[in-house]
Image (cartoon, grey):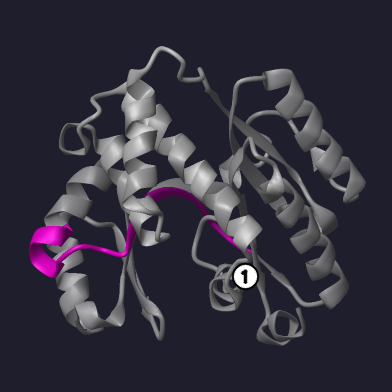
Amino acid sequence: MAGHSKWANIQHRKGRQDAARSKLFSKLAKEITVAAKMGDPDPEKNPRLRLAVKEAKAKSVPKDVIDRAIKKSLGGDAENYEEIRYEGYGPNGIALVVEAMTDNRNRTASNVRSYFAKSGGDLGQSGSVSFMFDRVGEIMYPLSAGDADDVMMAAIEAGASDVSSDEEGHWIYCADTDLNEVSSALEAALGESETAKLIWKPQAPTEITDVETAQKLMKLIDTLEDDDDVQNVTGNFDLTEDVAAQL
């Protein structure tokens, strides 16, 4: 799930099983292929491809998988994927943004609508929940990059709009259109980041305090992310420490 949240941290700590890892690699490779096909196959000349490759490397995608994904974009047999965003409400009215890449819009729309319905949620129209999020660039550095003050100064000089540091690292945010420029400036100052990507950042996350709601929501998110056409799922929620511990 995109974004910096307790649930994302839980997923990171528990790791992924081999099947989930393979699915993740496939989705990251799809983004690389689409980015390379839409622009230049050279990451240095294609900002979107550069960020896609960085994200893949951060998730330990093997170099040969990355290279094959780029080469695939040059062949005439590369699939034509359409990027679609779905918006809706999950259990307890939690807003969700679902980003997909598909070669069959009808199939994907039908599947996503079914997932929401089965969870007791509701798939809405475009714009029905995205106004609760900001589309921003997110750049993450480990604690070893420096102390909070040094990272903040570097981020400000690079053109970032916000910085948040905690026990897991430094989270730097910028305008979506500035991500490549800010990321490059930060690399010159702090070294290579762990991740640099576009996210939907919740403006005012809803705190989930009961386990039942959290379980239903996590089940919906897991189901959505398990779909081959779905690339990212973001929600405007946060889990209390007690609920996170029980999941």
- Front-lying residue, 179 or 106: 106
View extreme (left): residue: 188
Residue 90, image x, y percentages: 79, 51
The number of callouts visible is: 1
Name the residue beneath numbered marker 1.
7
Q: Is residue 218 visible?
A: yes
Q: Is residue 196 visible?
A: no
- Front-lying residue, 78 or 40: 78
Secondary element under disc 1, as helix, strand or loop, is helix
Residue 180, image x, y percentages: 23, 44
Q: Is residue 46 above or below residue 173?
A: above
Q: For residue 122: magenta?
A: no
Q: Is residue 230 above or below residue 132?
A: above
Q: Which residue is at a point 51% across and 17% down the rendered structure image? A: 80
Quadrant (top left, top right, bottom left, bottom right) of the N terminus = bottom right
Quadrant location of residue 222? bottom right
Magenta-drawn segment: 186-205
Please rate how many residues cluster around mark 1, counting C-alpha atoms within 10 Å: few if below 14, some from 14 to 19, many from 20.
some
Q: Which residue is at a point 79% across and 33% down the rendered structure image? A: 111
